[in-house]
Image (cartoon, helix red, strand yellow):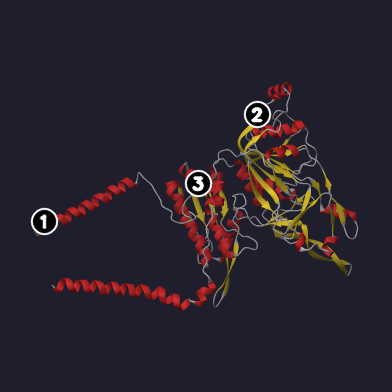
Amino acid sequence: MKNNNRNQAIGQVVMIIAILFCINILSSFFFARLDLTTENRYSLTAPTRLLLKNLNNEVFIRVYLEGEFPAGFKRLRNSIEEMLDEFKIYAGDQLNYEFIDPSKQGTDKEKNEAYQELIKQGLTPTNLQVQGVDEYKEQIIFPGAIITYKGHSMPVSFLNNQLGVDPHVALNNSVAMLEYKIANVINKLQREDKPKIAFTEGHGELNELQVKDIADALSEFYELHRIDLTKGILIDSIYDAIIIAGPRQNFRPQDIYKLDQYVMHGGKILWVIETIAASMDSMKSMGKAPEQFITMDYPLGLEKILFDYGVRINTDLIQDMQCNYIPIVVGMQNNTPQMKNFTWVYFPVITPEASHPVVKNLDLIMTKFASSIDTIKTSASIHKKILLSSSQYSRSLLSPVEVTTELLRNPPTQSQFNKKHLPIAVLIEGKFHSTFRNQLSDATARMMDTLGAYPRREQSDDNKMIVLSDVDLIRNDTKGDQIVPLGYYSFTQQTFANKDFIINCIEYLVDKNGLIASRAKDVKLRMLDKGRVKKYNTKYRVITLGVPLLFLLLLGAIFNYIRTRKYAK
């Protein structure tokens, strides 16, 4: 009897081992993961998974966020490790990483040399200030990584510094952006050919110096050119996207035809268009008190093509109570002008609120003399998405507008700012109809087909474009031959997210694999109610510590009772 029981037990153990062995073999051929979080926190988007599976060489990531940190940065560090582990699941041996503490470099001299080397490679240090119970200390950290692929390296910063945003929320946004930031750098490193981007010329567009900062930033990832729209028959199809930045002269019908057919054949356009001449330089040149100028319209001939695509840039100026400052002389002291900053409602400061990948988690954006954009109902295949808009306390004034500093002395009341969220940047997607559809004579159409590098089309496949109504979104200031970084406002010494916004616009337009979709990922921040925690601190401690102990004691008592009854028989 005992031998039978023993043989039966051995057989069961062997069977369990065999089943586990078979499961292990089968699991090497099949892969599945279950993410139970509501926001799919631990799931990579399909484009990221595809990118990782198709890596043909090793990606090595050195993360420099290691050491003793406050809870928020520990969460960021652990989230990075979790994300990289998720990346390894799909990339396998083609992706490896290590965490490095740059502060542990021996002597102070060696540590400073290590810091300088990281800065040289493109990482930005952060001075972490920690207020403890008994002490206050500062710590230099590098919340970023260097990613290397086929001998080429590129930095990535993990920390989102957002003006006016709670530090906990900013860190949470940083966690939400991890997948996109890492995958985006890997994608750029493994590109064999850079996408080609062109700034247009020939109609008074911004010159090279005025867009130099954004051009330098884009040139790291794209091949940049400048093309004259007044020359040639059509826009060369080698360009993945073109940027029309601040034209001031009228477009001829043949130039508009080039743009239209470029779109019909899949070309992407970033339109940065103003319809009103307004500049603070004009105000200064008046030499009056109060200083003032009158705005002027300048037609570009682009109204119909934009209307046919689904938008209209209005000839107005937006005033917004959420705005930037301008310096005004308020007096003299020792023959020196005394300046004071005043809010200037013609310089709206935009808070990106849309959940679209182009603007998700972006910092504040600076505008100057922006116009509003109307979206026009066209075909059902065209979809519009407002990317940037004014605050809920704004209004628009139709041109001509008298812009005067008298507004600072007698500002309008809040009740007069009764227009909410006036659009300044709009994304248009879908199948576009040619603005020249049914307008060309047969002879003209045949001539265009003969001269063109590609056949004339009257409808595009799925395509997209972005329209901006303020040139200052892309224009950097200049001081002689020197440029001021795009988004930097010297009067307040504040840097806005204009450069990041333009880069995101271009990435979205030319993104063929959909990686930018991961920028829309959201990680919910589930904060404890500090008031309730303080009020019920003792109660919850008793519950969390006492209830498990009571449960264990109850189980022990039940187990002991069952054993006593069993062996008492």
Instruction: Identify the residue under disc 3.
Output: 48
x and y percentages locating residue 172 in the rendered image? 55, 60
Camera-nearest label, 1 or 3: 1
Camera-nearest label, 2 or 1: 2
Labels in figure, total: 3
The kind of residue on which mark 1 rests is Asn
Q: CA distance from mark 3 to mark 2?
A: 34 Å
Instruction: Identify the residue under disc 1.
Output: 4
x and y percentages locating residue 468 in the rendered image? 70, 46
Q: Earlier in the sequence, mark 1 or mark 3?
A: 1
Near mark 2 (Cα within 10 A), the count class, few <14, some 14-19 or many ≥20, is some
Q: Earlier in the sequence, mark 3 or mark 2?
A: 3
Q: CA distance from mark 2 to mark 1?
A: 84 Å
Asked whether, in this view, residue 494 is left or right of residue 6, the answer is: right
In this view, 153 is above or below 381: below
Residue 309: which quarter of the image? top right
Residue found at x 44% / y 50%: 88
Near mark 3 (Cα within 10 A), the count class, few <14, some 14-19 or many ≥20, is many
Task: Verify CB contact (< 8 Å) between mark 2 and mark 1.
Answer: no
The kind of residue on which mark 3 rests is Thr
Identify the element where label 1 is drawn.
Answer: helix
Q: Nearer the viewer, residue 415 or 101?
A: 415
Please give the label number shown on residue 440. none
Q: CA distance from mark 1 to mark 3?
A: 56 Å
In this view, 460 is above or below 207: above
Task: Verify CB contact (< 8 Å) between mark 3 and mark 2.
Answer: no
x and y percentages locating residue 377 in the rendered image? 67, 42
The kind of residue on which mark 2 rests is Arg
Q: Nearer the viewer, residue 262 or 317?
A: 317
Instruction: Identify the residue under disc 2.
Output: 457
Q: Earlier in the sequence, mark 2 or mark 1?
A: 1
